[in-house]
Amino acid sequence: MAVIERINELESEALAAVSGAGSTGDLESVRVRYLGRSAELTEIKKGIGTLPVDERKQVGGAANRVSRSLEAAIGSRSQDLAGGEREKRLREEAVDVTLPGVPYPKGSLHPTLRIIDDVVDFFVGLGYRIAEGPEVETDYYNFTALNIPPEHPARTMQDTFFLDDGLVLRTHTSPVQIRTMLSQEPPVYVVCPGRTYRRDSDPTHTPMFNQIEGLAVDHGLSLAHLKGTLAAMARHTFGEGAVTRLRPSYFQFTEPSVEMDVSCFVCGGADQNCKVCKGAGWLEMGGAGMVDPAVLSEVGYDPEEFTGFAFGFGPDRMAMVKYGVPDLRLFFEGDLRFLRQF
Ligand code: FA5
């Protein structure tokens, strides 16, 4: 019977095509061609109903047998191909972990940030909390609450950038002391790093600079606690040999007030020509003192019960002396040739 012969021919043709398929994509085309909706075999099956009754069974049987045989052949070929393709992909995508890596440029920490991290780490290690405040401050927090009333000559000690509506760019981080004390009861132990602004520009002054404020308020704190804390901080930041000294100074919000120096860690005071300390043997780090009772009263703390000490360092200056940088303005110019040296 011609139809049966054709079915057998289709089988051999299709089996040859299945073995010849080189990829799972090819195999799918073979499946569509021989078993798909408009494949010749499918058409034959659709036409079975029109055949004479005695042929229907034979043709149907042959067509079904060939369909099953093709499906089985396609299934097994498909597994072989998929396995082969996976192996090929794994081979192609294999990574040689023994090859050297591709180096990529790395940034480094800004020298000021290193000092800030170092100093803040030290105080956090002592149990201090980190506090922050806004860079645009009200006149009240920047001056008045710090015992510097309007018209007081002490205001001229800091060249202020005034904004509208009684706002200023904060000239120091000391307003964070006030914000902290107003938001909590003693004991207080905070360290407050942040950006500050003054109308200054020369090799050791920039209009934007950083400060690190510290404040401790508790029962029985004295100048001795301040001195010990500052000395330990200097040893941590500049090395075990660092020695500190306090000089009398004046701040409206501390009484007594001191200026803190650290021994020159380059020459220790032994070299008249030292580039870092210029032969002085000492480097200035910042101001400090015992919190003025007027400031404690302003924030509602009882100055009879509590005492406190506060300090404000200039980490840019500290970085300048630690890394021997002659001009502070270099820190803020963003020149990569400069920054890459650290
Ligand atoms: C103050 O700002 C006080 N608020 C510090 C203080 C805090 C005293 C708490 C007592 C208690 P002074 O103006 O000295 O103090 O500044 C402190 C440090 O900031 C200076 O020692 C210096 O390191 C740094 N500094 C000040 N002005 C500049 C500037 N224009 N550029 C870079 N650093 C500066």
Image (spheres, rainbow, N blue to C red):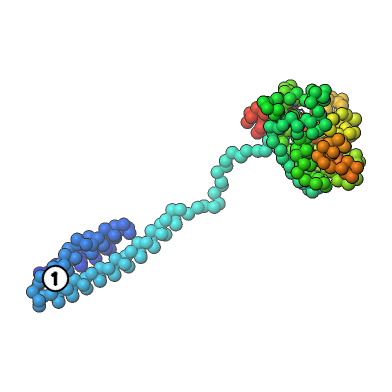
Residue nearer the viewer, 68 or 207: 207
Residue at the spot 19% in from the left edge and 62% down from the top edge: 39
Residue at the spot 62% in from the left edge and 38% down from the top edge: 107
Q: Quadrant of residue 55?
A: bottom left
Residue nearer the viewer, 228 or 325: 228
Left or right of 64 in this view: 318: right
Q: How many marks?
A: 1
Quarter of the figure that contains the N terminus: bottom left
Residue 245, percent from left and from top: 89, 34
Residue 268, percent from left and from top: 86, 33
Residue position for label 1: 48
Quadrant of the picture in which ligand 1 is shown: top right
Residue 49, percent from left and from top: 12, 71
* Crowd rating for badge 1 (residues with CA inside 10 Å; few <14, some 14–19, many 20+): some
Q: Quadrant of residue 253?
A: top right
Extreme-left residue of the structure: 52
Left or right of 167 in this view: 99: left
Examine the rendering and report whether any part of residue 261 can be seen. Answer: no
Residue at the spot 61% in from the left edge and 39% down from the top edge: 106
Quarter of the figure that contains the C terminus: top right
Residue 172, percent from left and from top: 76, 32
Left or right of 115 in this view: 6: left
- Tell me which amino acid carries mark 1: Ile
Residue nearer the viewer, 79 or 161: 161
Instruction: Name the secondary structure under disc 1.
Output: helix
Residue nearer the viewer, 208 or 233: 208
Residue at the spot 9% in from the left edge and 72% down from the top edge: 51
